[in-house]
Image (spheres, rainbow, N blue to C red):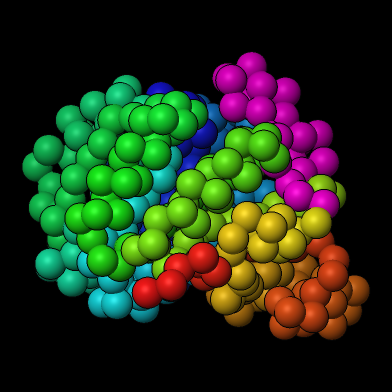
């Protein structure tokens, strides 16, 4: 299991324990474990640069709760130690499918054995880099559920452009997949992350790789259109988690506030994509 999963769970644990918490994840600290605490304590500027992960989680929570009544299933790719099926207000008849490495699935299943899920939960142990196995899973789920929402939180940044494009193609090929919720980093943010955390994560086998220069156009070239764009800076200010918001607003507000269709610059934040290939 990648250490990054424990690290991100630790951010959720700390946020959940704030008096003004944006979300409450009662399982986060259990899932993060000692490894998550160690990573947070030893990663350079871990708390200073951790706010985008908290904002990303909160924004995705809002979108998932809004869309869940409109779909039959949620496909959570590289689910890691996410606990949304246990903590979000989801329809009981919703099917939630988590996909990740076998070691991650085993670890998570053992720690949450006594926790009641709020919807029907299925876990699939699968290496998503195995494209044939991935496509077989997608085809099975596409035949079983008329409308699905795919989620890939914190996954794409660890993929190269070719692998990210192949995943986008495979998801777009599912006729019953109208939406894909994901996040995007820009080249300049990638450079900051590499300088700050890159060496440590490379040692752990999880280097930062993907931040498309063409921004949202990358996804449109693979069969997706941008339905919603939630920039980290604007959402961070809205949620009161963005440090020095007043300074950055002066520099970037007009550019970051543009509608997705008007943007021609770099994008950093959460994307809700719509399947342009879907006919039904």
> Which residue is at 41% across, 45% downward?
77
State how many labels appear.
Answer: 0
| Image position of 76 with respect to 93: above or below | above
> Which residue is at 71% across, 63% downward?
216
Q: Is residue 198 visible?
A: yes
Q: Where is residue 184? Give x, y as percent.
A: 65, 55
Q: Which residue is most to the right?
A: 251
Q: Where is residue 86? Give x, y as percent.
A: 22, 56
Q: Quadrant of the C terminus?
A: bottom left
Give the side of residue 138 with respect to residue 222, left or right: left
Q: Which residue is most to the top?
A: 203
Q: Where is residue 102? Give x, y as percent.
A: 30, 25
Q: Which residues are magenta?
A: 190-213
**Which image quarter: residue 85?**
bottom left
Does the magenta portion include 197? yes
Give the side of residue 136 with respect to residue 275, left or right: left
> Which residue is at 24% across, 71% downward?
89
């Amino acid at each position: 299991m990648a250490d990054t999963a424990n690290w991100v769970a630790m951010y959720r644990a700390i946020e959940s324990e704030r008096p003004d918490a944006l979300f409450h994840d009662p399982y986060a600290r259990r899932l993060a474990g000692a490894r998550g605490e160690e990573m947070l304590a030893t990663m350079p500027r871990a708390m200073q640069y951790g706010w985008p992960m908290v904002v990303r989680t909160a924004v995705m929570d809002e979108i998932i709760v809004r869309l869940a009544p409109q779909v039959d299933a949620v496909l959570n790719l590289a689910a890691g130690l996410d606990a949304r099926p246990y903590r979000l207000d989801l329809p009981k008849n919703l099917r939630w499918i988590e996909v990740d490495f076998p070691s991650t699935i085993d670890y998570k299943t053992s720690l949450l054995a006594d926790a009641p899920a709020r919807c029907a939960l299925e876990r699939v142990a699968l290496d998503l880099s195995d494209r044939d196995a991935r496509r077989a899973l997608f085809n099975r789920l596409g035949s079983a559920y008329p409308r699905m929402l795919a989620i890939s939180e914190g996954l794409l940044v660890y993929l190269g452009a070719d692998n990210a494009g192949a995943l986008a193609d495979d998801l777009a090929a599912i006729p019953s997949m109208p939406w894909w919720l994901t996040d995007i980093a820009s080249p300049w943010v990638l450079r900051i992350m590499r300088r700050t955390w890159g060496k440590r994560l490379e040692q752990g086998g999880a280097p930062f790789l993907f931040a498309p220069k063409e921004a949202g156009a990358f996804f449109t070239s693979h069969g997706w259109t941008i339905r919603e764009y939630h920039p980290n800076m604007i959402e961070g200010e809205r949620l009161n988690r963005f440090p020095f918001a007043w300074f950055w607003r002066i520099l970037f507000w007009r550019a970051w506030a543009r509608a997705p269709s008007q943007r021609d610059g770099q994008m950093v934040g959460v994307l809700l994509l719509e399947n342009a290939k879907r006919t039904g």
